[in-house]
Amino acid sequence: MRHWLGIWGAVLAGMMLPMAAQGAFQITRPRDGETVSLLKPMQRALALMTEAQLEVFLTQGTVERMADVTTYPAGIEVEWNAASGAVACYEVRVADNAEMKRDKRIRAVQPKCVIQNLEIGRTYYLQVAALDAAKRAFQETKVQSFVVENLAPRVMNIPGVPNVRDLGGRIGLEGRVIPQGMIFRSAAFNDNSTDGGKTAGKTRMDKENLAIAAEALALKTEIDLRWDSELADMSASPLGQGVRYQRIPSTLYGGLFSPNGHENYRKLFQVFTRSENYPIGFHCILGADRTGSLAAVLLATLGVSREEIIRDFCFTSLYAPFLRAPHSIRPVLDGLAKCGQPGDPLSTQAMRYLLRCGIRSQQIYDFLTIVLGPELAMPSALEEARVREQLQERFQLPAKGLAVAPYTVREETMLQNGRQVHWRVPFWHVSPLRSAGADGTGAFCLHLRNDAPVPTTVALAPEVKALAARQYHVLDPLSKVVYCAPDGATRWKTEELSRFALVLRPQEEQMIVVQPAVGELPDGHQPLAWRPPSYSPYVAEAPAAPAPRIDGRLDDAAWQGQAPLAMTDTEGAPVHNAPKVYLRTDAAHTTLYIAAELQDGTPCAKAHASRDASLWTEDSIELFFASHGDAKTYQVILSAAGCIWDGINGDGRAWTLAQCEFKAARTPSGWTMEAAIPLAQFGFEGALELNVCANNNPGAIHYNLFPTQGALGHRAAISPVLLK
């Protein structure tokens, strides 16, 4: 048994207790066979709440007013009738088997104690003996059992260190239970530096605490997520020389998905891929934000449900000075979702994130089998990654003679601000080509991934004169298909390769192999009829109309005659009572008129009244303007209170919208707005592109005209406007 049996109550060896007998010498609490909880009532209530309940409960700050919440669990309270005779003390024996083999023994002078750090979901056996002055047992209760409630988290009692929890006890992939005693999250084992990072902070571990931690946690590896300014010159674990200390300063929340975040989590996760490192404990200072972000990724990878991950994160509210509601961890869960495709399980999304961090498929599988056990089926995301890795190892030479290009689905020429401009879609802001290689036999391999929130197209762009063969097979090695040429044959003539194209959905990955057509089809591959890509690109139309009167009310004739554009959620799905957008232009196409109608039953109680305030935190419309070939994205936020925020590439100090007529008005069901924005002030040489987003607060609910996956200013979601 990997746990320490702590006692709460007086312990005084050798003290003689008065003779007393109130009934037979027997255990009265817990009852034989009873299921009992390690948690205090408030802790247990939090562990049972749904995501929606947690959001309301924690947003209201209720936890701060609960009197029974401290940093430690309740433990298992044990009571028994006093024994008759001269009792020096009692010996409580606890084991995980009815024969009481390998039992743990603790002593108490009063007929009660509290046992800590047992495993959840397990049956334990209990016996109490009365000892005389020579510490000999002269009376024993019968052995009886109790069950620790199978309710995560398993909260540990390590004196001096709050917020210590076991990640185990939860259901993971294939219904397997994550073992307890392997991975722990906690607050730090020492204080932060108090002199600006010159010297390390004071330890929280005295001799007794060290012994408890060694028995209860038995850590082999401690991962410290704190930053250098918090750690100073720390190079060893406060837990002692037997614990390997890994100092990996870490990011949190949305920072996980930046290039630095990828490198950070590559280093972190590699610690979990080696069995000799377990048991592992990780922490920041409070065990809240940086720790919570890492815990979410680990649990997601292991197959734990979203709701269980959110509960684990929110449980920190019982320890940290600030409450952590579900919306705080959503940047991590939403970021993982963007690494997968619609419908992917959370575990698949997490694995794809780790792959993007540079973790090999075998390393992720090693982690899964170390924790969940052998003979685990290889998840499909890792199977695909393994094939990609093998192909990339084979195709390491430069891919001379074959590249990719956008496959144009729609193009238009229009009048804009007094001049003719041309646009086409899709337009790549970032190429979906992740890597390209050759193997020296005339074959090529292309790794494609669409990181944009909207679909895109990819076409082969061969240099015909540079290609050695006259005919080629075009393969998808993951699906094991050979794409047929336009004439139905499985071989593509060299000059036909430029006609091959496909659509990539958001976050979709593809491996395409183009190899000389020699002999029969590759083993296991089946022919598949190829069709030119067909999808409806995102384009907003703004027909010409008489200039509307800008008063915030949509009763002007300019908004009539054409149906409004309905916004969607950030993933592109329809929503009930969706905000409606109207786009118009003048006859010369020099001004864009924008109107919106929003349903809002929860208007903000407070609103900013100054320019360039944080308008995204209240009810507002966000406009993103851009143009082909222009690196700048102009952002304008118009609030229901009639205020404006403006900036370039997210910088509110870099640019001021010089010309804008804008009004907003409240309606019985929400609010409306109108704006007239001259286009010349942007200085665009190319065609106008736009996205319109809406913020509904409180609640931080977002809508968009074109899907953004939550990144409202995502460049690839800013789409052409057809001025008609």
Image (cartoon, grey):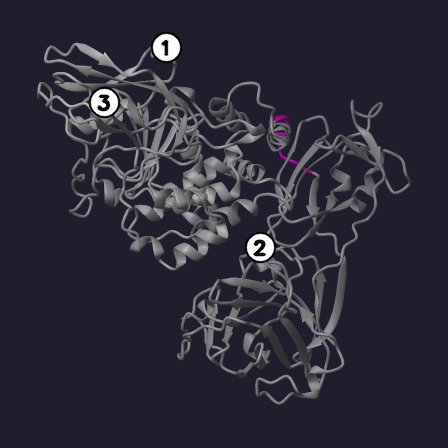
Quarter residue 553 falls in: bottom right
Quarter residue 668 falls in: bottom right
From the viewer's perspective, is residue 660 above or below residue 136? below
Bounds of the magenta segment: 390-400
Q: Residue at the spot x=75%, y=67% of the render? A: 412
Q: Amino acid at mark 1?
A: Glu
Specify which label sits upstream in the sequence, 3 or 1: 1
- Is 6 in front, or is 544? 6
Looking at the rendered structure, the secondary structure element under dot 3 is loop
Marks 3/1: CA distance?
A: 36 Å
Quarter holding the N terminus?
A: top left
Specify which label sits upstream in the sequence, 1 or 2: 1
Q: Amino acid at mark 2?
A: Gln
Residue 446: mark: none
Marks 1/2: CA distance?
A: 57 Å
Q: Amino acid at mark 3?
A: Gln
Residue 241: mark: 3
- Is 19 in front, or is 549? 19
Disc 2: which residue: 709
Is 710 one of the magenta-colored residues? no
Q: Residue furthest bottom?
A: 549
From the viewer's perspective, is residue 33 above or below residue 538? above
Asked if the residue at tag 1 contacts the one at tag 3, i.e. Cβ–Cβ closer than 8 Å, the answer is no
Is 391 one of the magenta-colored residues? yes
Disc 1: which residue: 99
Residue 628 lies, in percent from the top left, at 63, 64
Along the horizontal axis of the image, is 334 left or right of 536? left
